[in-house]
């Protein structure tokens, strides 16, 4: 807004005709930015190795140095707009790398510590009579499979049918309410789901009840909304033309849904269900309050306490036995098994969606 | 096979909105009836009331009557599913079932309705249907391949074979060639001329040359203005509609002076 | 056209076939069952919590009544979740931006997958990691913080010697909600209309200016909604906090000492297995409070996200 400026050079944006803007502009030399990155990294490394600083401040310092130098340099040579662009690029990329750190650290820790106890005994023994070393997770693995399997058995039909209702039949207030509350249900804290299942079973069996099936009910509360949402998405992807083609052949609605719509969406639904299972199989809190912990094999979900991998890992860690190290190893071992299961389930989900998607085109 | 359809004073509503008003016509058996008219005039909507497909839209309803031979299609005791078994439909875009093979697509009408046939009977039916859709020679070696692997024109003929396989009385076609190239269109038009020996065919088309080429009777739909219901302006022998229509609007539309 | 009297207007017919009626009935029933279950969650929790509401104050654990029992828990829950969000949201937006706008297309998909995997890691593992890896690492920096920045209430110290502090709990929570927020924001960024982006580029914007003009405004309400979802998750996260936090104190803003307020969820997990009688009722009452808070937070989140859907014209 400087009214005193009269010379066109001082306000080039307004007075230079656009055709007069040169197509070339000041640019950092090729490789300047990557070069600076390497230089900062080396400087940081030197500080760490030679000056003996801690690694975290070194890394932060190197990153800060890179950002400041590149920004100033770019601002001088290329102008403020380009400099800001470079600054944001550096920050965004840095944030991404920063976020990868915990993931790498988590995976590395679990794998390295978990491998201590990957022996045959670990997978074939329970914890009966084990106070020090040894012992295994057989009972916990079976418990996890049984409880998660039951949860899937409850959630998948209810979730799929609800999704079918929402997509194929649902209209008006009821459908709106169900959609909304399914969304809300996605956010129920897992511990609250556990308390719900506990409260429900207390009404039936009296206080202090612990049962595998109660855990399955708690997990179902967490799983149903995921199943509903993913099934719903997949059903919506089925083109309406297929439904019409079926109706036009004189096929009743329910047969159209069962024989045309569901098979077309099946791969997507299976993927969603697998991911939903992967999500609940690692749950701890709701099982802590419903299924509890036991040292021995209990494969009857309707009778007494039942151990799962996550709860097992938790207790091995917070209340170790005679030799704390042995307990910790067991805790990490169980955690590693759990994470492998989750990853494998995720992998299976991807494979299903890749392989079995209907070849529409 | 092939039945006559009498439509009388048909009004079609979406909820409170009157979409098509006062249609009366007779659709002759063993002939092709073409419905032409500008976009949005309700010809597709009308076509879908003939096999009660319009009911899939919530709150859609009709007043008036549609009688096929002696059966009122809208009598309270009539099940729309059974109506559709007798009046088949082919859509604008070919829509073979992506999870089924070519063979299963043709057999779909029976299989989905759980009608069990002997393997040999089923084979025979599939072959006959594909032959009557002029597709047999092209696909007989790959009946177990997915139907979606065919070309657009082949897919549309597959859909016709699928509609024919349930042995309907009437075949409705909703712009069946609008997504096809001229050669595939030619193949479908030839097919229509063959099929009319056995079926009552009603086709909605935007293409006036097509109507002139394939149909015996042509009905012209128009609407008075935006927000007004569509209506049947006139229906007559195709040669007459295209040479000496009795209505000014028809003449304008056919000669391209539409406005 | 006035012949409506003989044929009364026909309504949209209910399915007539028994198969249709049964199938529609079953699927509607499932939907209703979900509503009932949710109502059941509320009803059962209230029923089981009720004794603690009517019990005399001295019977409640702590002996000072229900409100004073829950208040520090509530405080701990809120402060940990909110601060975790303060860390996670900017990071999540940056990651989403990196994946959608900066990373080469070929690896962007893989990166998205990696982030999704992070979301699938069970919370017990984050708990183990937090207590084993993260907590020891924080001891030195927090000591430094308490010595040099002790005038800030958050860093009043004295620093915990185990590292099992509120700060570590907050970082773990941030890491855990990060992928959830990222997923939603990334979705919004990928849905940014290409036309808007190209329009911005066509007037000579740099990449950042394009993002500021086209992508960020488009994703704004998604970012808000995603943050609320993350908040809901952080409020309810149980095991990681239960393991990491050495919960022994009351209400305090001090993030780095060994005396921290516990969170509702963690407190339930820690106390429940050893509790009985009125203590259980009290814990369920605190769970009810948590349920109410997350319910409200999630409802707001959904409302914000759904409103975006109405306005965006995408899909």
Image (cartoon, rainbow, N blue to C red):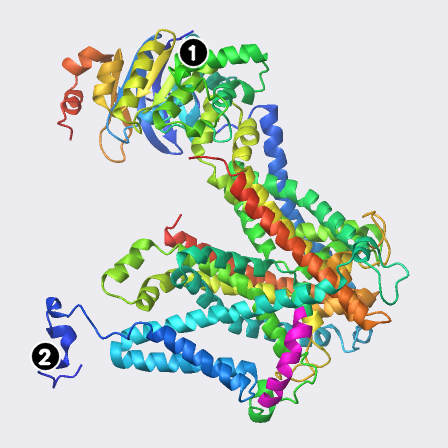
Query: Residue visible at 65% across and 72% down?
Result: C130
Q: Is the residue marked by circle 1 packed among few (<14), some (14-19), or many (20+) residues within 10 Å?
A: many
Placement of C259 over or under B167, stated as above or below: below
Residue A85, how many percent across, how many down? 33, 72
* Residue occupied by mark 1: B169
Q: Is residue B53 left or right of residue A193?
A: left
Q: Mark 2 packing: few (<14 Cα in 10 Å), some, or many (20+)?
A: few
Q: Identify the residue at horizontal 52%, vertical 56% (top origin).
A: C113
The quadrant in which residue B188 appears is top left
Q: Secondary structure at mark 1?
A: loop
Q: Is residue A223 left or right of residue B245?
A: right
Q: Which residues are magenta?
A: C129-145
Please tell me the numbered disc located at residue A8: 2
Q: Position of residue A52 (x, y in %)?
A: 56, 88
Q: Is residue C240 visible in this depiction of the protein?
A: no
Q: CA distance from mark 2 to mark 1?
A: 83 Å
Q: Position of residue A341 (x, y in %)?
A: 67, 53
Q: Chain ID for label 2?
A: A
- Asked if residue C295 is positioned above or below residue A361 in the image, the reply reads below
Residue nearest the viewer, comparing C17 with A321: A321
Answer whether residue C138 is magenta in the image. Answer: yes
Foreground mark, 2 or 1, reads 2
Residue C312 in the image: state x and y as whole percent.
38, 54
């Amino acid at each position: 807004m400087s009214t005193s400026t009269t010379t066109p050079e001082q306000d080039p944006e307004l007075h230079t005709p656009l055709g007069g803007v040169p197509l070339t502009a000041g640019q950092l030399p090729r490789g300047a930015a990557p070069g600076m990155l390497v230089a900062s990294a080396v400087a940081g490394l030197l500080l760490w190795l030679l000056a003996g600083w801690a690694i975290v401040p070194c890394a932060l310092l190197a990153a800060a140095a890179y950002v400041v130098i590149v920004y100033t340099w770019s601002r001088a040579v290329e102008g403020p707009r380009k400099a800001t662009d470079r600054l944001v690029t550096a920050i965004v990329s840095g944030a991404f790398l920063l976020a990868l750190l915990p993931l790498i650290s988590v995976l590395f820790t679990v794998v390295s510590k978990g491998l201590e106890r990957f022996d045959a005994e670990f997978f074939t023994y329970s914890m009966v009579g084990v106070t020090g070393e040894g012992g295994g997770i057989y009972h916990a693995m079976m418990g996890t499979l049984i409880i998660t399997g039951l949860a899937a058995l409850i959630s998948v039909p209810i979730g799929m049918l609800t999704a079918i209702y929402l997509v194929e039949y649902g209209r008006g207030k009821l459908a709106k309410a169900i959609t909304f509350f399914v969304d809300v249900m996605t956010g129920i804290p897992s511990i609250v789901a556990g308390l719900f299942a506990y409260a429900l079973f207390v009404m039936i069996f009296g206080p202090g009840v612990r049962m595998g099936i109660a855990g399955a009910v708690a997990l179902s509360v967490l799983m149903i909304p995921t199943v509903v949402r993913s099934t719903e998405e997949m059903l919506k992807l089925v083109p309406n033309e297929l439904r019409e083609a079926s109706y036009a052949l004189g096929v009743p609605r329910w047969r159209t849904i069962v024989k045309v719509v569901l098979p077309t969406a099946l791969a997507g639904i299976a993927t969603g269900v697998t991911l939903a299972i992967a999500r609940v199989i690692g749950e701890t809190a709701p099982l802590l309050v419903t299924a509890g912990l036991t040292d021995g094999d209990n494969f009857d979900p309707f009778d007494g306490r039942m151990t799962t991998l996550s709860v097992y890992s938790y207790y091995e860690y917070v209340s170790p036995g005679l030799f704390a190290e042995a307990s910790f190893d067991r805790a990490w071992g169980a955690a590693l098994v759990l994470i492998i299961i989750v990853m494998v389930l995720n992998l299976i989900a991807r494979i299903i969606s890749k392989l079995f998607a209907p070849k529409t085109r | 096979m092939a039945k006559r359809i009498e439509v009388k004073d048909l009004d079609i509503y979406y909820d409170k909105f009157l979409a098509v008003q006062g249609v009366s016509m007779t659709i002759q058996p063993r002939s092709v009836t073409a419905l032409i008219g500008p976009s949005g005039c309700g010809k597709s909507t009308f076509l879908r009331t003939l096999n009660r497909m319009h009911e899939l839209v919530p709150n859609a309803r009709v007043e008036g009557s549609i009688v096929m031979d002696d059966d009122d299609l809208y009598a309270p005791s009539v099940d729309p599913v059974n109506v559709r078994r007798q009046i088949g439909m082919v859509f604008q875009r070919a829509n073979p079932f992506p999870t089924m093979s070519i063979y299963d697509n043709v057999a779909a009408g029976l299989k989905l309705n759980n009608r069990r046939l002997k393997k040999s009977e089923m084979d025979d039916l599939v072959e006959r249907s594909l032959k009557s859709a002029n597709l047999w020679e092209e696909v007989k070696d790959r009946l177990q391949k997915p139907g979606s692997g065919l070309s657009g024109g082949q897919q549309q003929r597959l859909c016709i074979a699928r509609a024919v396989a349930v042995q309907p009385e009437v075949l409705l076609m909703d712009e069946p060639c609008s997504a096809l190239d001229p050669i595939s269109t030619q193949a479908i038009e030839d097919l229509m001329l063959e099929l009319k020996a056995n079926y009552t065919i009603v086709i909605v088309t935007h293409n006036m040359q097509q109507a002139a080429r394939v149909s015996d009777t042509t009905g012209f739909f128009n609407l008075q203005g935006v927000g007004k219901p569509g209506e049947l302006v006139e229906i007559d022998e195709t040669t007459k509609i295209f040479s000496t229509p009795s209505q000014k609007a028809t003449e304008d539309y056919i000669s391209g002076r539409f406005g | 056209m006035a012949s409506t009297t003989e044929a009364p207007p026909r309504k949209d017919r209910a399915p007539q076939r028994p198969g249709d009626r049964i199938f529609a009935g079953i699927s509607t029933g499932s939907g209703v069952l979900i509503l009932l279950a949710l109502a059941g969650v509320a009803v059962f929790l209230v029923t089981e919590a009720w004794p603690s509401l009517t019990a005399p104050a001295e019977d409640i654990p702590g002996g000072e009544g229900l409100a004073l029992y829950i208040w520090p828990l509530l405080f701990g829950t809120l402060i940990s979740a909110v601060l975790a969000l303060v860390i996670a949201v900017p990071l999540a937006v940056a990651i989403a931006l990196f994946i959608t706008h900066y990373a080469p297309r070929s690896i962007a998909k893989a990166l998205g997958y990696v982030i999704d995997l992070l979301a699938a890691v069970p919370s017990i593992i984050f708990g183990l990691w937090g207590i084993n890896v993260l907590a020891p690492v924080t001891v030195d920096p927090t000591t430094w913080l308490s010595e040099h920045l002790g005038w800030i209430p958050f860093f009043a110290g004295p620093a915990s010697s185990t590292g099992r502090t509120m700060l570590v709990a907050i970082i773990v929570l941030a890491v855990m909600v990060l992928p959830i927020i990222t997923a939603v924001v990334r979705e919004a960024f990928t849905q940014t209309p290409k036309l808007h982006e190209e329009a911005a580029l066509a007037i000579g914007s740099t990449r950042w200016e394009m993002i500021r003009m086209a992508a960020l405004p488009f994703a704004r309400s998604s970012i808000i909604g995603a943050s609320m979802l993350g908040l809901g998750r952080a409020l309810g996260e149980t095991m990681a906090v239960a393991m990491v936090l050495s919960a022994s104190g009351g209400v305090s803003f001090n993030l780095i000492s060994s005396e921290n307020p516990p969170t509702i969820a963690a407190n339930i997990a820690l106390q429940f297995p050893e509790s009985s009688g009125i203590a259980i009722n009290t814990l369920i009452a605190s769970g009810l409070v948590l349920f109410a808070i997350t319910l409200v937070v999630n409802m707001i989140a959904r409302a914000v996200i759904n409103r975006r859907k109405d306005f965006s014209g995408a899909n």
